[in-house]
Amino acid sequence: MSSKTEVKWLGDMAFDVELNNHHFTIDADEKVGGQDQGPRPKGLLLSGLAGCTGMDVVSILKKMKVKDYKFTIEVEGKLKKEFPKPYEKIVTQFNFKGKNLPKEKIKKAVKLSEERYCGVSDMLKKAAEMKIEININGERI
C-alpha cells in the first residue's frame, strides 16, 4: 500500500493538501505570513503518530476481547531551539477510561504498537527521543 499527496499553493503561506482523495489546508501562523487557516506541517507528524498508534492499539485490544472503554491519545513534541527546529523529544500519552480494564493487556497493546506495528513511530524514533505514558482512569501505570 502506498500513499500519494499533491500540495497546491493557495497564496501567502497556505496550501491545499490532497492525500489519497482527502483534502485539507495547511497554513502558517500570522506572525510568519500565514492566516492560520489550518494546521502546521510539523504538527501533522504528531497527529499521524497518534492516529497510527491509536489504530494499532484499538485493533490489538479488539483481538484481546477488551471492550467498553474510552480512549484518547495526547502527543506532545518538544522542538529544538536551532533551525530547522526538529522535534527532539516526543511524549505519547495513552488515556483509557472504563471499568475493570485489564492493565497488562493495555500495556501489551501499546508496546506492540510502539515496537512492532506503528510505522510512524518507527520513523520518528530514529529522529527524536520517544516517551510513552499510559493512564487508566487517571492513574499512570
Image: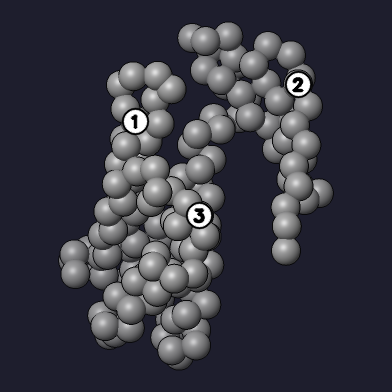
| Residue 83 x, y percent position in the rendering | 40, 19
Q: Between disc 1 and disc 2, whose residue precedes?
A: 2
| Residue annotated with mark 2 | 9
The disc labelled 3 sits on which kind of residue? Val
- CB under 8 Å between callouts 1 and 3? no
Q: Which mark is residue 79?
A: 1
SS class of the residue under badge 2?
A: strand
Assess disc 1: are there few (<14), some (14-19) or many (≥20) residues with their C-alpha within 10 Å of its C-alpha.
Answer: some
Tell me the CA gap for discs 1 and 3.
Answer: 18 Å
| Residue 17 x, y percent position in the rendering | 73, 35
Assess disc 3: are there few (<14), some (14-19) or many (≥20) residues with their C-alpha within 10 Å of its C-alpha.
Answer: some
Name the residue: 33% across, 79% down: 108
How did the renderer colour the structure?
one colour
Q: State the residue lying farthest toward the bottom.
A: 65
Q: Between disc 3 and disc 2, whose residue precedes?
A: 2
Nearer to me, 141 or 112: 112
Judge whether 61 appears above or below 49 on screen: below
SS class of the residue under badge 3?
A: helix
Name the residue: 40% across, 31% down: 86
Q: Is residue 93 left or right of residue 67?
A: left
The disc labelled 2 sits on which kind of residue? Trp
SS class of the residue under badge 1?
A: strand
Name the residue: 68% across, 11% down: 12
Q: Which mark is residue 65?
A: none
| Residue annotated with mark 3 | 120
| Residue 41 x, y percent position in the rendering | 56, 33
Tell me the CA gap for discs 1 and 2.
Answer: 26 Å
Q: Is residue 41 left or right of residue 4?
A: left
Q: Quadrant of the C terminus?
A: bottom left
**In the rendered image, which quarter is residue 76 located in?**
top left
